[in-house]
Image: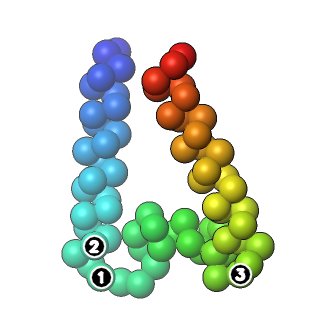
């Protein structure tokens, strides 16, 4: 299977699910709302864990795309 088809399909499905969650307007059903709950960013420890994880991922991804 062509990897481009897989990734485009995944992105389209994500867009459909996220769009439906935004239109529905129920609290807690978007990816950002789920992420806030999963990482418990309403607590100091959760903010630190998420912030460090996000920074590490962003740094790795930048390096991975530009120099690997």
As measured in the structure, the alpha-carbon distance from the residue carrying label 1 to the one carrying label 2 is 5 Å
In the image: residue 22, left or right of residue 43: left
Which residue carries the number 3 mark? Answer: 43
- Percent of width and height locating residue 49: 72, 62
Lower position in the chain sequence, tag 3 or tag 2? 2
Which residue carries the number 2 mark? Answer: 22
Q: Quadrant of the C terminus?
A: top right
- Percent of width and height locating residue 39: 65, 68
- Percent of width and height locating residue 63: 55, 28
Which mark, residue 11? none
In the image: residue 9, left or right of residue 50: left
User: Of circles 3 and 2, which is in front?
Assistant: 3
User: Of circles 3 and 1, which is in front?
Assistant: 3
Q: Quadrant of the N terminus?
A: top left
Picture residue at 50% right of the left edge, 34% below the top? 62
Picture residue at 60% right of the left edge, 53% below the top? 54
Q: Is residue 5 above or below residue 68?
A: below
Secondary structure found at label 3: loop
Query: Mark 1 touching mark 2, by CB under 8 A?
Result: yes
Lower position in the chain sequence, tag 3 or tag 1? 1
**On the image, which quarter does residue 51 sit in?**
bottom right
């Amino acid at each position: 299977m062509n990897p481009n088809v897989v990734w485009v399909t995944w992105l389209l499905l994500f867009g459909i699910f996220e769009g439906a969650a935004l239109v529905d307007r129920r609290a807690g059903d978007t990816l950002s709302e789920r992420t806030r709950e999963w990482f418990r960013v309403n607590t100091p420890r959760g903010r630190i864990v998420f912030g460090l994880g996000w920074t590490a991922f962003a740094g790795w991804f930048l390096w991975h795309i530009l120099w690997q």
